[in-house]
Image (cartoon, rainbow, N blue to C red):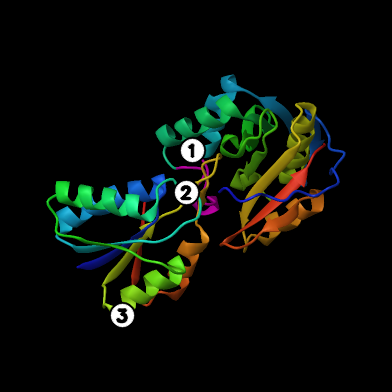
Amino acid sequence: MTRERVYPEEPAGPFPEPPQSFADREDREISIVTADEADVDAVTDMYCDFDPADRAQGIPPTGETRIREWLDTIFDEGINVVALDDDTVVGHATLVPDTANGEGDECAYELAIFVLQSHQRAGIGRQLLTTLLGYGKREGIERVWLTVERWNRAAVELYRDVGFETCGSESFELEMSLRLSG
Amino acid sequence: MKVLLGIDGSDESMKTLRKTIDRAREAGDDLTVVVVPKEEAKRSQDEMAAAARDLVTEAGLDVDVRVVAGDPGSTLVDIAERESFDQLAIGGGTESPMGKIRLGPITEFVLLNANVTVRLVR
């Protein structure tokens, strides 16, 4: 995509920074912490348990080998947070630099977020998302974008609610963007 | 089977072309390749057509390679219908930095408007 992506003029936020902990709607004690390469095993386990029906636009891939390859790239290049229920990873959110459209040091980041089926509809996604954005801002990231399938109303509403604006819709997916600073 | 492949001058199209040639050899498809215009593509339409002719010759296939003008999606759908192709093959999308598959506007147009079976090549 060589097309210029449009970003809101005003920065969104403020957003909480990791670590965070809270009781979800099912009264489970959930913590949200930053994750790095050392956590890839635990995150791989989560994606191995992931219901294929909740895949979006081809991710997460299926099968441990492909999941691990995918996560290796994401953890190598991006910044990550995970949601933990005890020591089990039940959610993961990531910002991956869009190097193809990089403008010097300041490139935009693509966002994605996944919550394990057993822990959906409990408010964890919103906390993961806002905490990832707080982490991103702390790390100096200025612009964030994502794509979401149009029919996924819950996700579109959540993104809009935290400050994302629709910036493209010429294809099956909606494209949304958010400014963290700058 | 009579297969129409639509490509532009991108690297993704080069991959799609190679895979479709392999498949045509295996299945004995009667393949036609149409090179559509794309702004800022890595290769011009003529360069892409020349590359396609080289690849099909290498593969020992007798393939009609054409360069067309006009809106890519509607031109492909139109050729597929007018010339009674059994199948219209196009690239199955690019990947975002995250690894998400992204279908472009040409793919969407073809999927929604073609009266023939559409194959997304991945």
Q: Which mark lies nearer to you, 1 or 2?
A: 2
Say what amino acid the circle numbered 3 marks. Answer: Arg
Say what amino acid the circle numbered 2 marks. Answer: Thr
Relative to B57, say whether B37 is above or below: below
Q: In the displayed structure, does residue B37 sit left or right of residue A89?
A: left
Rounded to the nearest whole Å, what is the CA distance between mark 2 and mark 3? 29 Å
Residue A94: quarter of image:
top right
Q: Which mark lies nearer to you, 1 or 3?
A: 3
Label 2 packing within 10 angstroms: few (<14), some (14-19), many (20+): some
Quadrant holding the N terminus of chain B: bottom left
Q: Which residue does the numbered mark 3 point to in the structure image?
A: B82
Rounded to the nearest whole Å, what is the CA distance between mark 1 and mark 3? 47 Å
Rounded to the nearest whole Å, what is the CA distance between mark 1 and mark 2? 24 Å
Q: In the displayed structure, does residue A23 sit left or right of residue A169?
A: right
Q: In the displayed structure, does residue B52 sit left or right of residue A15?
A: left
Relative to A148, say whether A28 is above or below: above
Point out the stretch of residues depicted in magenta.
A48-61
Q: Is residue A16 magenta?
A: no
Secondary structure of residue under mark 2: strand
The residue that appears at 33% across and 70% down in the rendered structure is: B117
| Residue A33, visible in the rendered structure | yes
Residue B93, numbered circle: none
Residue B36 at x, y = what percent? 39, 61
Residue A48, numbered circle: 1
Q: Which residue does the numbered mark 2 point to in the structure image?
A: B94
Q: Residue furthest left?
A: B60
Q: How many labels does the image show?
A: 3
| Residue A121, visible in the rendered structure | no
Q: Are marks 1 and 3 in contact (CB under 8 Å)?
A: no
